[in-house]
Amino acid sequence: MDLHLRAGTDEWREFYFLLCDELLVHLDLSEAIGDYAKDLWAETVLKVPRAPLPLVVDCVYIAAKLTGHRRSIRVVKKATKDLWGRKIDVLPLDRRRGQRRRWVWGMEQTIRTTLALDDELWDDFVSDWAPNGEEKIVADSYWEEE
């Protein structure tokens, strides 16, 4: 497939959906989770400060977590290394323009609508982050390689 596809076209969208499918298979996640991830990606790809492939990874992680099929960030990063030869960070802080926030905060309503979330699920999703959306509170060992 041509890697110089024009953003926003059907071919471009299908290319990233194929990559999403690869990641789903590698993580042993269902097609239904993939449908949520693809819908979320399609709703956010031209609206958030994230490249299309890393956004695919974020959306798969979010859909898996919010449907009760959690995969750790470490496992997802390893899967991206296995599939595409490089580790892709999952939901990193956006450090551009002096902001230290994740893109999900600006897209809360889109995420809630796309995945039909209630307050309890959303609160669980963001529970590891500080109230201002800046820091994820995890032990340093979480980020270490096995």
Image (cartoon, rainbow, N blue to C red):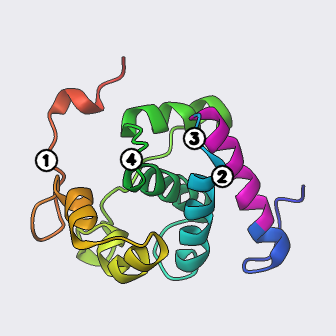
Magenta region's main secondary structure? helix
Q: Counting other residues with Cα less than 10 Å from the Cα at mark 3, is it few (<14), some (14-19), or many (20 or more)?
A: some
The amino acid type, in three-letter code, at marker 1 is Ile
The amino acid type, in three-letter code, at marker 4 is Gly
Give the residue at mark 3.
Answer: 29
Q: CA distance from mark 4 to mark 2?
A: 18 Å
Q: Counting other residues with Cα less than 10 Å from the Cα at mark 1, is it few (<14), some (14-19), or many (20 or more)?
A: few
Q: Counting other residues with Cα less than 10 Å from the Cα at mark 2, is it few (<14), some (14-19), or many (20 or more)?
A: many
Among numbered discs 3 and 4, the one appearing first in the sequence: 3
The magenta segment is 14-27
Q: Is residue 26 magenta?
A: yes
The amino acid type, in three-letter code, at marker 2 is Cys
Q: Nearer the viewer, mark 2 or mark 3?
A: 3
- Image location (x, y in percent) of residue 39: 59, 70
Above-or-below relation of 123 to 141: below
Q: Quadrant of residue 71?
A: top left
Q: Nearer the viewer, mark 2 or mark 1?
A: 2
Q: Quadrant of residue 95?
A: bottom left
> In the image, is 73 to the left or to the right of 121?
right
Q: CA distance from mark 2 to mark 3?
A: 11 Å
> In the image, is 5 to the left or to the right of 59?
right
Q: Which mark is residue 137?
A: 1
Q: Nearer the viewer, mark 4 or mark 2?
A: 4
Q: Are marks 3 and 4 in contact (CB under 8 Å)?
A: no
Q: Nearer the viewer, mark 4 or mark 1?
A: 4
Above-or-below relation of 20 to 44: above
Label 1 SS? loop
> In the image, is 68 to the left or to the right of 43?
left
Q: Are marks 2 and 3 in contact (CB under 8 Å)?
A: no
